[in-house]
């Protein structure tokens, strides 16, 4: 609205203006006008006084202030808050005696200009106080580059939450992406911070290798002030907790090792990313280890196995029943909760000695043939208990034993095995050996004793029950006995029905005893010189005895006669055209004897008699194949022929 003031020629004082210089009011009328209230506008619209105008930080804006219909023309001044702003040169638009002024001001608002007044003032020389108008600036700010909280290193199978935050005005829209694929998110309540809006969004997921390892996690932010979308991107690294850990050779929570024998134990952590670090403990005390390897996992070469080797030489005292623990950690594992495998060390120890109770090694044990004898063998202080085996020489006789176990206070065990054995005379000089069997011993432990078997005297020259000597000749009668202790031999003859012991008198009767310790035999020879038939012919008794028993044998002394028939004729080899024959010689009748072999095809031919045969065996060839033959043997000496042996039958092949 333009105000016009008119002054009369009679009263200049009515004009309430300051006009410089002398004023003559007489007969003159002056026309002046105060500027109207200015108006602010921009390219978008005209703005009323006090209106809130949205501007974007960093963008350039041009505002126009218009003040008009005044005389003289007004002066326009721009203020931002209390600070005058530089503006363009004003444009004056005249309308008769009145003028309108237009002045543009261009500036780039910043966040610090938020909630400031942008004011346009207009005045001229007749304005008692400047006219003004203003608008309130609402400065919009584009989102800052988002921040993503949390480490890009995450653990497979463990839920993880990332938070994306940005500051802007007005609030921003946040969008999550994994490998450029949008993700469902949880947007938090926006927070006001001195006019700026903090916008945040949570992304929660459970990572795995296939979908997340090496993938790009991105958060984008935009708002009305900036739609170009600021973004933050990180590369995910998925770590994997080893899915198993195991100690080699362990079974049902125990690991068997051998006392004072070096053991190589391996612990394998399977399938970690990154490779796990392994630490060994014995009863919770760390122990050193060697040779750590980290090969690719066989099922997934993105993962690593860790193999750690522990070389341990355990002792029963220090390590038995102690806990051996293998502990694996990597960056995916909570350091306070490592994965581990525990086993109890079961230290096997071999017997510290093996002994046959009451005897030292290589002692002699005297026992009687045919009488049961018992021996106890102890394998001492072993874990687990040793087993015991018994041998007679190299023949296993363990079946004749039974065992029992005794526990020591330190957990070791004694094995006591009782052997029951009934020796025979042929066992004399054999060794009874006790052996311990135990997995912790590399060399068999054993002890042995020697069997000294006592057995009754026995005379074994059964085929020599006759002896011959003519008048004036010397007679030799022999008797051989076996037994242990070696028997004593006495000779007896019979006079008028009574037994009379013969004594060596060096004139006509000489008795010589020859013991043989190796064979446990004694040979006794009775020599009678210048035989007198009516005195010396008759029965002589050989009596052999020891502490176990005795034996008697009668030998008849007579004049020379025909030999006894051969016995036990038998074949020792038959072919298609030959045979080997042997036999046992009978009594020679008191002089040297020789033999004849007679044979024929059964019931067909006459017997064919061989030439003189000094000693068996005898070989016959030229026979027909697949043919039956019968054969017998006769003996001859200087006196006469013997009776024939029994006839045997054989068949060639």
Image: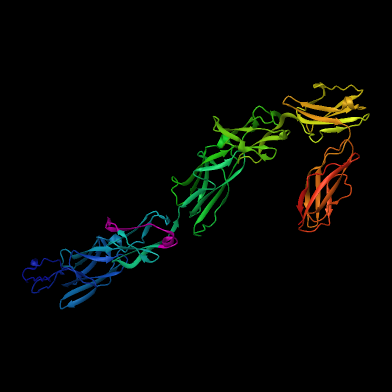
Write down the quadrant of residue 26 in the picture: bottom left
Q: Is residue 559 above or below residue 265?
A: above
Q: Nearer the viewer, residue 406 or 270?
A: 406
Residue at 6% across / 71% down in the picture?
A: 8
Bounds of the magenta span?
187-216
Q: From this viewpoint, which residue is outermost toward the bottom? A: 96
User: In the image, is 643 to the left or to the right of 42?
Assistant: right
The front one of 452 and 372 is: 372
Which quadrant holds the C terminus? bottom right
Asked if residue 444 shows in the view, the reply is yes
As for residue 189 lying within the magenta part, the answer is yes
Foreground: 553 or 348? Answer: 553
| Place of residue 28 in the rendered image (x, y in percent of width and height, measured from the top left) | 10, 74
* 550 lies above or below 174: above
Decide which of 95, 294 is in the foreground and name it: 294
- Residue 70 visible at all: no
| Percent of width and height locating residue 647 | 78, 47
Relative to 298, is 593 on the left or the right?
right
Query: Residue 79 in the image: x percent, y percent?
Result: 25, 64
In the image, farthest residue toward the left? 10
Residue in view at x 56 percent, y 33 percent: 404
How is the model colour-coded? rainbow
- Residue 635, by quadrant, is top right
Instruction: Quarter of the image for the N terminus: give it.
Output: bottom left
Residue 638 position within the rendered picture, expressed as x and y whole percent measured from the top left: 91, 40
Is 27 in the magenta? no
């Amino acid at each position: 609205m333009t105000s016009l003031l008119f002054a009369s020629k009679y009263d200049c004082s009515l004009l309430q203006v300051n006009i410089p210089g002398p004023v003559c009011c007489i007969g003159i009328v002056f026309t002046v006008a105060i500027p109207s209230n200015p108006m602010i506008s921009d390219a978008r619209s005209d703005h009323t006084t006090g209106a809130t105008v949205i501007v974007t930080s960093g963008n350039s804006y041009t505002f126009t202030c218009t003040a008009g219909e005044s005389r003289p023309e007004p002066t326009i001044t721009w203020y931002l808050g209390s600070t005058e702003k530089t503006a363009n040169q004003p444009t004056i638009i005249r309308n008769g005696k009145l003028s309108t002024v237009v002045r543009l001001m261009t500036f780039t608002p910043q966040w610090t200009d938020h909630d400031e007044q942008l004011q346009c003032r207009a005045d001229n020389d007749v304005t008692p106080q400047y006219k003004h108008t203003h608008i309130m600036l609402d400065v919009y700010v584009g989102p800052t580059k988002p921040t993503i909280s949390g480490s890009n290193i995450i653990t497979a199978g463990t839920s993880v939450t990332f938070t994306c935050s940005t500051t802007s005005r007005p609030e921003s829209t946040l969008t999550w992406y994994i490998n450029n694929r949008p993700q469902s998110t949880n947007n938090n309540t926006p927070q006001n911070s001195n006019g700026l809006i903090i916008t945040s969004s949570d992304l929660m997921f459970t990572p795995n290798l296939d979908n997340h390892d090496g993938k790009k996690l991105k958060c984008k932010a935009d708002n009305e002030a900036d739609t170009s979308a600021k973004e933050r991107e990180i590369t995910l690294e998925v770590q994997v907790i080893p899915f198993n850990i195991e100690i080699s050779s362990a079974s049902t929570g125990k690991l068997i090792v051998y006392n004072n024998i070096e053991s190589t134990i391996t612990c394998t952590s399977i399938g970690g990313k990154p490779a796990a670090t392994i630490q060994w403990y014995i009863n919770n005390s760390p122990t050193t280890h060697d040779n750590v390897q980290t090969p690719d996992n066989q099922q997934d070469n993105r993962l690593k196995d860790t193999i750690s080797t522990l070389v341990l030489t355990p002792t029963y005292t220090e390590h038995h029943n102690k806990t051996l623990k293998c502990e694996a950690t990597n960056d995916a594992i909570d350091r306070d909760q490592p994965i581990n495998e525990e086993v109890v060390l079961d230290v096997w120890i071999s017997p510290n000695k093996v002994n046959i109770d009451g005897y030292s090694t290589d002692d002699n044990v005297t026992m009687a043939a045919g009488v049961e004898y018992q021996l106890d063998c102890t394998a001492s202080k072993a874990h687990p208990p040793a087993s015991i085996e018994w041998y007679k020489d190299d023949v296993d006789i363990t079946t004749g034993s039974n065992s029992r176990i005794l526990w020591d206070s330190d957990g070791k065990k004694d094995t006591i095995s009782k052997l029951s054995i009934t020796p025979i005379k042929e066992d004399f000089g054999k060794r009874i050996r006790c052996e311990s069997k135990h997995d912790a011993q590399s060399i068999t432990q054993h002890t042995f004793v020697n069997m000294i078997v006592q057995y009754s005297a026995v005379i074994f020259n059964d085929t020599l029950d006759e002896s011959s000597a003519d008048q004036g000749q010397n007679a030799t009668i022999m008797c051989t006995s076996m037994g242990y202790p070696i028997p004593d031999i006495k000779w007896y003859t019979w006079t008028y029905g009574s037994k009379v012991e013969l004594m060596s008198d060096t004139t006509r009767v000489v008795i010589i005893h020859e013991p043989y310790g190796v064979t446990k035999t004694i040979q006794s020879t009775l020599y009678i010189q210048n035989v007198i038939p009516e005195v010396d012919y008759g029965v002589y008794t050989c009596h052999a005895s020891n502490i176990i028993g005795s034996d008697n044998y009668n030998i008849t002394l007579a004049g020379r006669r025909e030999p006894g028939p051969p016995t036990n004729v038998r074949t020792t080899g038959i072919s298609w055209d030959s045979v080997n024959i042997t036999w046992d010689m009978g009594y020679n009748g008191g002089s040297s004897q020789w033999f004849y072999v007679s044979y024929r095809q059964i019931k067909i031919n006459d017997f064919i008699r061989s030439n003189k045969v000094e000693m068996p065996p005898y070989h016959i060839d030229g026979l027909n194949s697949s043919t039956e033959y019968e054969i017998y043997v006769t003996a001859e000496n200087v006196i006469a022929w013997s009776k024939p042996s029994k006839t045997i039958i054989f068949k060639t092949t």
